[in-house]
């Protein structure tokens, strides 16, 4: 079953971690031909292994704290934002229960 994505101008409420069930999962909010936005839920100790994508990435930490391993190591806590260039390899390690918004901008040339 395919996930339902947001429609244009549809409001999405991103709930606080404390209001989410303990088994809450990462979910794609929207995916178009030019961008994708994902609400990442990473529990303490969870990792996203090293990989890269062929587009710009933005990562906004809503709650919690993670370590981003990219060309440098960056500690992100609530309200921190970072972007990565296309093709840059990165990994994410959750230092605590964390909620993040990940956006990928696709180059369609």
Image (cartoon, rainbow, N blue to C red):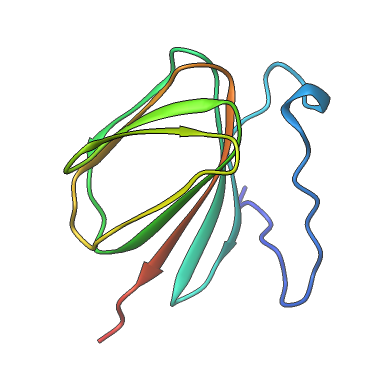
In which image quadrant can residue 55 be found? bottom left
Residue 88's spot in the image, x, y percent? 19, 52
In which image quadrant can residue 6 be found? bottom right
Q: Name the residue rendered at 51%, 26% in the picture.
A: 65
> Observer-nearest residue: 80 or 12?
80
Q: Name the residue rendered at 46%, 70% in the picture.
A: 35
> Observer-nearest residue: 90 or 83?
83
- Is 21 on the left or on the right of 38, as rendered? right
Total numbered labels: 0
- Is 46 on the left or on the right of 106, as rendered? right
Residue 7's spot in the image, x, y percent? 72, 72
Q: Name the residue rendered at 31%, 82% in the picture.
A: 108
- Is 97 on the left or on the right of 23, as rendered? left
- Is 4 on the left or on the right of 38, as rendered? right
In which image quadrant can residue 91 be found? top left
Residue 61's spot in the image, x, y percent? 55, 40
Q: Relative to residue 6, is residue 89 depicted above or below?
A: above
- Say which quadrant the C terminus sits in: bottom left
Q: Relative to residue 4, is residue 93 depicted above or below?
A: above
Q: Name the residue rendered at 66%, 60% in the picture.
A: 5
């Amino acid at each position: 079953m395919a996930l339902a994505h947001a429609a244009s101008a549809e409001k999405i409420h991103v709930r606080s971690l404390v209001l989410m069930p303990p088994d809450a999962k990462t979910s794609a909010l929207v995916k178009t031909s030019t961008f994708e936005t994902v609400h990442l839920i990473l529990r303490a100790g969870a990792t996203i292994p090293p990989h890269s994508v062929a587009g710009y990435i933005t990562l906004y930490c809503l709650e919690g704290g993670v370590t981003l391993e990219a060309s440098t190591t960056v500690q992100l806590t609530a309200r921190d934002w970072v972007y990565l260039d296309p093709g840059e390899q990165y990994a994410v390690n959750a230092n605590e229960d964390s909620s993040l918004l990940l956006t990928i901008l696709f180059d369609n040339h």
